[in-house]
Amino acid sequence: MRRSIILFLALYSSLICDTTCAQGIHVSSLDTDDGLPSPEVYFAIQDFKGYLWFGTDRGLGKFDGDKFVVFNIDNSNLTCNTIFKCYEAPNKDLWFCGYNGRISIYNQSREAFEDFKFNDSLESWFKYWPSTIYFNSNSVLIMSTSDHYKYAKFDMNVSNLSLIYYNDVIDARYKTQDSRSNQDFFYSSKLSPSSNDYLYLTNCNNCLDQDTNSGKWHITNQIELNDTSFFAYDSVLYAIHNGKMSVVRKFDEDINHISTDNINKLFILTPKGCYIKKGTSYRHILSGKNITGMVIDHEGYLWFSDLTSGVLCVPSVEFVVEDDTQLNNKIVTKIFPYDDVLILGLNSEELYWYDSTGEIHLLSKKTSRLNRPFRINNVSTSFGVTAVTNGLIIDKSDTGFNVRKLHTESSSAMTVYLGNNQYLSVPYSTGYALHSVTSGWERVTTNRERVTSIAISKDTGVYIGTMQGLWYAPIKEIRKPKKIPLSSRKSLRINDIIVKNDSQLIIATAFEGVWFKNGKDEIFVLNTKSGLSSNVINCMHLYNNKLWVGTNKGVTEIFVEPSLGHPYVKRNINMDEGLISDYVYSIGVWREEVWVGTDKGLTVIPLSDGIVKRKKPYLNLLNFYSRGKQTVIELLLGSINGPIFCFSRGIRLLSNF
């Protein structure tokens, strides 16, 4: 009897035992402590129900997103504990290839293993284990690891297995698109860049039977990406396009496996990590890992099988984690695009900048006399002057940067230049201070409200956010700020302000989401009810018609009309998608990428919408039947492309109608 499926919703961060940041991506891992039968993993695959399967030298691990079920020869009909490969049949059954040369078939309807009925023949015909299985409409083709001149053909109509010989070395099938597409074409392992021949296989019982006896998997596997077929032979990646074969790239190490996201990326898995080919460029991730296989699950997460350390989960390879040693153990509290460079302010009272090549440089060290350095949380440009926390002024020339300190009587959290040798600074107390380059300073009160943010409006006025609300003062009357009523609430803490077209405001609040105030004094509010991941807004950055918002639960992308009317949430991004941490201190767009400063480091997100989006799940009806006076409904949590993997045992709804 089929076992029901218990609905289980969980975040990846709660499922994985160890979370690290390696080679610029967010990587989580599963190992024997989580129930994996062995750290030596040969492949990863997801079945149509959403379960993840991992083959090891100590049995099969079936993962439901919460825990493992381990199958071996002692507790199931599995024919071998060392499982190298898995192939999914058209009827969704799983065919597992064992090291002993036998095939185990997992019957999905019975949820049990069966012996392939001709295993004895395979053992006697092949010297090594079956490494490749192809499913045709009425037959199954089985190839061995090094028996390159023969293969087994299982005819499902008559339930017969035959051994077929041929006169050239064959490793992998080529799916042709011409009129003979119902026939089987195979690659020859006698490869050369000038060769573009493929073989049509026929019965050839009189052909010479030879074997190189090398024990190697000469051709890994064949995949289709767009209109090109790819496969690998030893350390060389080949492509077949329009019937012609060419060398794509020769690697320093042999290739274990190749895969694709079916969109635009090719993954080349090797004993030295994974190479991601996108267009003509390559990116190397998981360096030092012996990657044997991978699968992109129904939710878009990438799972890699490693030969020494178990299973690695990567939420996204699009998100890059900056791991420069100069930023280690430091929090980036301010991100500020400045001409063609990017300025970073740190919680250690330091300033850094990225140049156009991506190199990072120290701009300024700690300048205050405080025992504990305070964070850089403000960089602003007005009247052509860029001012930074604590009265620092940045000047850029052809030869580099110059940082100078303006006269100030106290340590200031924020600084804005007001022109005419005057600037405004915010001390760690209520109100703000006015400073002159040549003379002293004076205090301006905000009715005992502590200032939390400042923004200048077209060099004509200053908006001041406080712990209790919003103030405004024209520069000509900077000593007479007035409070702007936003709501009936007595307290509305403002963490960040963006001024657009002088009178249009975007306001980040501490607990009430994002507020949009247009020139007509209309106010639109986005909060968790509108799709925001959190109402706690720490920072914002407006780029074209997109507002990027940093919260305590990740990043939110918001579409903003020029009039600021009717904004809406486009997507939320958090650790599940590849963000290194959900607590965001700072955010900014530079060189068509979104830079996010968190409490655990920097993450860079592509600005385009081309990254994988998580699919909204739905409930798929598996079974519906009566049991006495009760009606039993078996449901499977699914997604647009199929069931997601993160469920436990399932759900059984029992109800009376």
Image (cartoon, grey):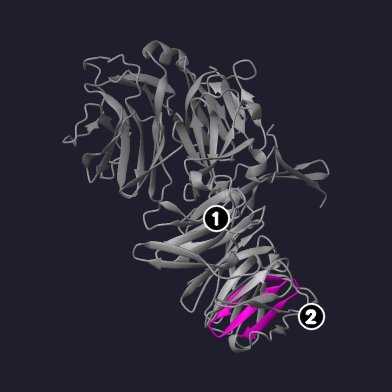
Q: Mark 2 belongs to which amino acid?
A: Ser
Q: Is mark 2 on a helix, strand or loop?
A: loop
In terms of image quadrants, where is residue 107? top right
Q: Which residue is drawn at 19% across and 31% down?
A: 192
Q: Residue at x 56, y 49 (%)?
A: 601
In terms of image quadrants, where is residue 189? top left
Give 42 or 333, whichever is nearer the viewer. Answer: 333
Name the residue at the top extreme.
124
- Left or right: 166 with respect to 287? left
Q: Name the residue under label 1.
A: 350
Dominant secondary structure of the residues highlighted in magenta in the image:
strand
Q: Mark 2 points at which residue?
A: 488
Residue 119, position as x, y percentages in the image: 46, 16
- In the depicted structure, whether residue 3 falls above or below residue 467: above
Residue 147, position as x, y percentages in the image: 32, 18
Inspect the magenta stretch and tell me whether residue 576 lies in it.
Answer: no
Residue 2, position as x, y percentages in the image: 68, 34
Inspect the magenta stretch and tell me whether residue 457 lies in it.
Answer: yes
- In the depicted structure, whether residue 575 falls above or below residue 127: below
| Quadrant occupied by the N terminus | top right
- In the depicted structure, whether residue 414 falls above or below residue 156: below
Q: Mark 1 belongs to which amino acid?
A: Glu
Name the residue at the left extreme.
194
Q: What range is drawn magenta here?
A: 451-474
